[in-house]
Amino acid sequence: MSTGSEEHLARVCLDADSCFFVFFSFFFNPFSTVNLLDSKASQGELGWISYPAHGWEEISGVDEHYTPIHTFQVCNIMEYNQNNWLRTSWIPRKSAQKIYVELKFTLRDCNSIPLVLGTCKETFNLHYLETDEDQGALFREHQFSKIDTIAADESFTQMDLGDRILKLNTEVREVGPITRKGFYLAFQDLGACVALVSVRVYFKKCPLMVRNLAIFPDTVPMDSQSLVEVQGSCVNNSKEEDPPKMYCSTEGEWLVPIGKCLCNTGYEERGYSCQACRPGFYKSSSGSMKCSKCPPNSHTYQEGSVRCTCDNNYFRSEGDPASMACTRPPSAPRNVISVINETSVILDWSWPSDTGGRKDVTFSVVCKRCGLGRPPCEPCRGSVRFLPRPTGLSNTTVTVTDLLAHTNYTFEIEALNGVSALAPSHRQFAAVTITTNQAAPSPVTVIRKDKTSRNSVSLSWLEPERPNGIILDYEVKYYEKQEQETSYTILRSKGTNVTLSGLKPDTSYLLQIRARTAAGYGTSSRKFEFETSPDSFSISSENSQVMLIAVCSAVGIIFLTVVVYILVSRFCGQSKSKHPGEKRLNFGNGHLRLPGVRTYVDPHTYEDPSQAVHEFARELDASGIAIDKVVGAGEFGEVCSGRLKLPSKKEICVAIKTLKVGYTEEQRRDFLSEASIMGQFDHPNIIRLEGVVTRSKPVMIVTEYMENGSLDSFLRKHDAQFTVIQLVGMLRGIASGMKYLSDMGYVHRDLAARNILVNSNLVCKVSDFGLSRVLEDDPEAAYTTRGGKIPIRWTAPEAIAYRKFTSASDVWSYGIVLWEVMSYGERPYWEMSNQDVIKAVDEGYRLPPPMDCPAALYQLMLDSWQKERNNRPKFTDIVSFLDKLIRNPGSLKVIANTASRPSNLLLERSGTSDVTTFRSMGGWLDSVRTLPCRDAFGGVGYSSCDTLPKTSAEEFKKVGVTIAGPQKIVSSIRTLEAHAKNGPVPV
Ligand code: ACK
């Protein structure tokens, strides 16, 4: 093999056993040749044959370097009819497809020969013959094929010979494709004077080469014009990034390198191989970079390290890159200062002297309550509040409020960084002990009206959340609402109830209560309004007729009362047997008992929330519950369907929410809080609690089973399959459930179609109750800038902005549910981001009407989305509005106008004055009634077709409705006015 220039060789190893010397650069020597025959290099006899024997003769001599050479010559120019053949020995082809024949020869100029007897020629012929085996001495002239006639570029004369200057000619001829195992060459002389100085036969190949850390083997090119595609294999300790490839050209050149290999982790590229990183160095990723020195506080003693090990007492957190120095936990915060203000304390400290080499330092504060001389301390109760929070503090201050008065506390302040968790024994904290001051009690928050008469009212209330000492008494201040506090009465009460007497009948009063301890009066409660009963018997004595009516009325009322009493007591008897409703309304265990007043009680007001569960939910025996299958997943565990068999009752289908194993006490409390809340409700549109299992595991909440699951997926499954009346019926149910909840004083905060369940009769029931966790549980809930988690798309702006959750914010959510229902489960605001939704709503944009949505319902949506929450309808209004629509289905035929909206806008600007002309749904309905065409409205309840007034068209334009059907008059007025306005009709 001719290897070209030796200085361009490199040693490359595929693995420990196979190393090669290869051309290391594509650019220096891209191709090589392989000799099949070199007459100059042959030391011994060449064994070539001459025909006839007196033709070509072999002459041994030396070249210019005095190296022995074989030359063949012939010069029979003095004779006629020369045909002298010289045939080489058999040349095996090896892998060659195309061969090159390089001839070096001298040729005598015929003119320089003075006396030629025969025919002098100045050319000779080159022939070849392919065979699969050596034919020995056998020679048949006709078997050979001619390659070419070879002429000299330079011939020599006698004079040249005398000067001993031989003019050497070099000619190269290509022959191919060669397909047999070998071949002969033959030189035919027809009467020339020629000396063959050397014959070299070779083929070209692409040589073994390393390129981009991939080894490409020796490759013989094709005879044709096409390139040979060759896959490279990665050198030892490297791996493919892109499969390495090159093409071998017919000229034996490597072309178009593609792809590459990269040294493995722990190895770097040196020369044309991948070498292990030296001790003290590492390489953590595969790539072309070099090994790096170990970062501070780390080391490695091995070769080929992927990363360095941290020195003692130094650590690397999971997210730290290998290039980062090892670090350690910070030292303790310094200079802790506490400023006590009654039952609050501001803690302030300085940064630790050593941050451990990291920037991600935060602080956490642990509160411990320490009895006087009574170690050990115990953790503070959950009611203690930290502002902004107890952990993950980036500033060096925190305010702790709602501590107990006159109590010792120790606060442990710890600086933490990303490696603190890895080094628990290295953590240090600073501690400060304080004693809170005497403090006045917190305000009374829960006041209830127990009994009202014409001149008196009985009230009761709950003790303040933080009495901060023993409550000596309560001050009750009240006055007539109209008097504006110009005159008032003050009473003191030792207990938590009072009866105010001597009041005026049918009069509104305002009342405030404040508690008193040794530390003085606490802040007054919010103003509580109550009214005395009307003076129904105040009649004029002169008017006997009126008197008679009054007496008759009284008799009638008494009679009616008796009938109602009998009916109600029967009904109650039945319902009692159905649900343990009445018991739920009593607050036991030291809590206020308020018979007859159905008001929601926050389970958090119970010192022990598990008491609340048993107050409002019955304990079920787990043996009566059979779980059939899992139907979904809640935050706390699986939701299953199953059956409940209560003693002497029929088996019923139930849904069972389970609490997953390994729960914390807090999770158990939160999980059961839903039952404590649900158990207080008893309404056909609120999911009914059957009971709880808390005394055995798993802890379960058992509710009625809703065959059709959640409303959003149910609607999506049945797209466009219901009549408008069916949809309105479902909406009415939800509104009715919500009215009940708002009457109970319960704000849902997460009203959305996904939280409504549907049973087999299409009855919708509100579900998913809970405390703070309600929103934690909801996958739609997102964190707001204020830290709370809120389902943005369903939530009123004031609730997003400053957490003002009220029944009015529930009404906003109801409007969104209405939109979800009418669009069969479409996602509100589609794929807009939460931020964009907040911005758009704030700028006055509102969702457009769903397809085919009755204008009345779209109007209800817009009303529910009034920015000013007091302008939104109440749930009671919504229920009666929907009832009216159901009674009057023709009113649903007017479809909200989607056509007038530009089609590329998802939302329309809802200008405050243009949103609606009708301040109430009643107004809208009335306007609908004034429409002339009974056909369009099913002929229900409309006065006259003659009364098509200007105003109805005007109003229609303002509410943005079109009328389906033959309402040509109205629509032409609309069209004219829309033209006049020169733009789309605002919604
Ligand atoms: O849409 P779904 O089938 O209805 O999937 C959810 C899943 O559990 C997680 O909440 C279903 N689910 C919840 N409560 C009930 C229930 N009382 N009856 C039937 N399915 C329920 C809900």
Image: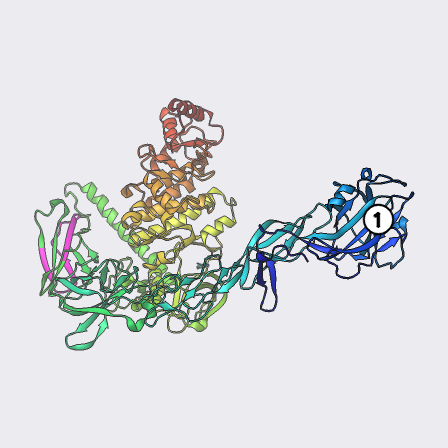
The residue at the point 58 percent across, 52 percent down is: 26
**Ligand 1 in which quarter:** bottom left
Residue 350 falls in image quadrant: bottom left
* Residue 348 percent across, percent down from the top left: 18, 61
Neighbourhood count class around disc 1 (C-alpha, 10 Å): few under 14, some 14–19, many 20 upward: many
Who is closer to the viewer here, 545 or 508?
508
Kindly identify the residue that appears in the image at 87 percent across and 58 percent down.
135
Residue 810 horizontal/vertical position (percent)? 33, 49
From the image, which quarter does the N terminus lie in? bottom right
Tell me which residue sits at (33%, 57%) in the image.
568
Give whichever of 28, 198 is nearer the camera: 198
Label 1 CB less than 8 angstroms from ligand 1: no
Amino acid found under the numbered disc labelled 1:
Val
Is 599 placed above or below 727 here?
Answer: below
Image x and y of residue 887, in percent: 42, 41
Total residue callouts: 1
Note whether residue 830 is visible.
yes
Q: Which residues are magenta?
A: 490-513
Report the quarter where the C terminus lies: top left
Secondary structure category for the residue under label 1:
strand
Disc 1 target residue: 74
Is 812 located above or below residue 358 in the figure?
A: above
Q: Left of 223 or right of it: where is 895?
A: left
